[in-house]
């Protein structure tokens, strides 16, 4: 069977590949500790679930407008105004099947073959794939662990060419947990506005910040960047609604019109019941979100200290999301007890999974060779056991 060139060129998500293998091993009877997926382990809060049940009982089970139901777009508009100080009309908002579809819609609406998209690395795995499907070229700007993965505005400016169409920012960041400083975000927003380049801000983790840190939206700091600005957020992470598949995009009207057309030609729109639940999510007592945030913060502090037990492993200091990026480059070139040479963190992740039943995601998935990403969206006992098993495995390498 001959598939399309685009289909043949797409690589499977390393995150899902690791998670799938972990599930297979667990099904075979092994006690696998899976820290590969970025998914909260909390149940969806009760008010959200109750609203979904109520929506079913009231018969809200039909098609919705492609852009999303008006009550949800109205609530998103007021939420952005009240919580972020940003003004978007309901005709500037589209609700989609998760923030991932929002990103895909925006990239398809903007990027032509030959266009360049600047992406800081390490990056979320789907950014380059989506740019590739659109026919664009990804231009990566490296951030470093020793700088706590902070983005350098000068490096962004140096990467700009006449073909640059879009800059993507993701803060708090997946996979590093870094939060870009106010000064750096503002500088990049002003740069994009000055150059007339589109700026996409992926803010899906903006509620999950720790130790007094604050996530900064570029459009708060530089209102003129909003003229070519794309804000993307959703409900999966902070609201523990990953399976509900609900996200939203706020952008200028001409772009929103194009995104509506793209969405209308693909999914038509997202789940009606999930949309009514989304209204409840934005209306509910935020103390419920704060409880989850505090739990994540406690896990982050615990894991950051526990990870110091890993021999010859360097760690960053995350301030948001629920990820820790660790540098295992010391072990590249070593051999496992069975004689296999560890040539990459793909090899290392496979070794840890197959021999110690610990699932991490290799850094190559994020453009960060030599590193592994750990998700701390699980309890402290599991985190401690993962570090203990990994320490044991590393000591067996020669």
Image: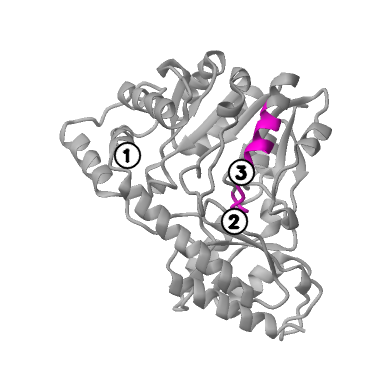
Residue 313 seen in the current view: yes
The x, y position of residue 231, in whole percent, is: 54, 29
Q: Which residue is mark 2?
A: 318
Mark 3 Cα within 10 Å, few/some/many (few <14, many 20+)?
some
The tag earlier along the polypeptide, 2 or 1, is 1
Q: Which numbered disc covers residue 387?
A: none
The x, y position of residue 307, in whole percent, is: 60, 71
Of the two numbered discs 3 and 1 in the rendering, the one whose residue sits closer to the viewer: 1
Q: CA distance from mark 3 to mark 1?
A: 26 Å
The x, y position of residue 321, in whole percent, is: 52, 51
Q: Which residue is mark 3?
A: 126
Quadrant of image for the N terminus: top right
The tag earlier along the polypeptide, 3 or 1, is 3
Dot 2 falls on a residue whose secondary structure is loop
Using the rendered view, name the quadrant where residue 349 is placed: bottom right
Dot 1 falls on a residue whose secondary structure is helix
Residue 148 or residue 378, whichever sits in front: 148
Of the two numbered discs 2 and 1 in the rendering, the one whose residue sits closer to the viewer: 2
Mark 2 Cα within 10 Å, few/some/many (few <14, many 20+)?
many
Residue 2 seen in the current view: no
Q: Which residue is mark 1?
A: 281
- The residue sitting at 78% across, 27% down in the picture is 114
Q: Which residues are magenta?
A: 174-189
Of the two numbered discs 2 and 3 in the rendering, the one whose residue sits closer to the viewer: 2
The tag earlier along the polypeptide, 2 or 3, is 3
Q: CA distance from mark 2 to mark 1?
A: 26 Å
Quadrant of image for the C terminus: bottom right
Q: CA distance from mark 2 to mark 3?
A: 21 Å
Residue lying at the far left of the rendered structure: 57
């Amino acid at each position: 069977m001959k598939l399309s060139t685009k289909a043949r060129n797409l690589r499977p998500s390393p995150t899902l590949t690791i998670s799938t293998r972990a599930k297979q091993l667990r099904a075979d009877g092994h006690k696998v500790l899976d820290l590969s997926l970025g998914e909260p382990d909390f149940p969806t809060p009760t008010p959200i679930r109750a609203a979904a049940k109520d929506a079913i009982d009231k018969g809200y089970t039909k098609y919705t407008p492609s852009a999303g139901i008006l009550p949800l777009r109205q609530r998103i508009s007021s939420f952005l105004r009240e919580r972020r100080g940003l003004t978007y009309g309901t005709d500037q908002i589209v609700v989609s099947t998760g923030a991932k579809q929002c990103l895909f819609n925006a990239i398809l609406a903007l990027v032509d073959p030959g266009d360049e998209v600047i992406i800081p690395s390490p990056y979320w795995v789907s950014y380059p794939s989506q740019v590739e499907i659109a026919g664009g070229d990804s231009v990566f700007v490296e951030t470093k662990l020793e700088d706590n993965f902070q983005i350098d505005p000068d490096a962004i400016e140096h990467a700009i060419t006449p073909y640059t169409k879009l800059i993507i920012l993701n803060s708090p960041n997946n996979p590093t947990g870094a939060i870009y400083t106010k000064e750096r975000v503002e500088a990049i927003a002003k740069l994009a506005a000055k150059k007339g380049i589109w700026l996409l801000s992926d803010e899906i983790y903006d509620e999950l910040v720790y130790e007094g840190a604050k996530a900064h939206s570029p459009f708060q700091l530089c209102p003129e960047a909003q003229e070519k600005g794309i804000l993307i957020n959703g409900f999966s992470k902070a609201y523990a609604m990953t399976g509900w598949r609900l996200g939203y995009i706020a952008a200028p009207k001409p772009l929103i019109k194009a995104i509506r057309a793209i969405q209308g030609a693909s999914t038509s729109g997202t789940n009606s019941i999930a949309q009514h639940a989304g209204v409840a999510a934005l209306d509910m007592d935020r103390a419920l979100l704060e409880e989850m945030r505090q739990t994540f913060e406690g896990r982050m502090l615990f894991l950051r200290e526990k990870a110091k037990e890993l021999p010859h492993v360097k760690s960053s200091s995350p301030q948001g999301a629920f990820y820790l990026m660790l540098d295992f480059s010391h072990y590249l070139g070593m051999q496992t007890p069975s004689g296999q040479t560890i040539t990459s963190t793909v090899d290392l992740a496979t070794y840890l999974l197959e021999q110690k039943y610990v699932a991490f995601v290799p850094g190559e998935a994020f453009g960060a060779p030599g590193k592994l990403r750990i998700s701390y969206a699980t309890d402290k006992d599991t985190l401690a056991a993962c570090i203990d098993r990994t320490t044991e495995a590393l000591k067996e390498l020669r």
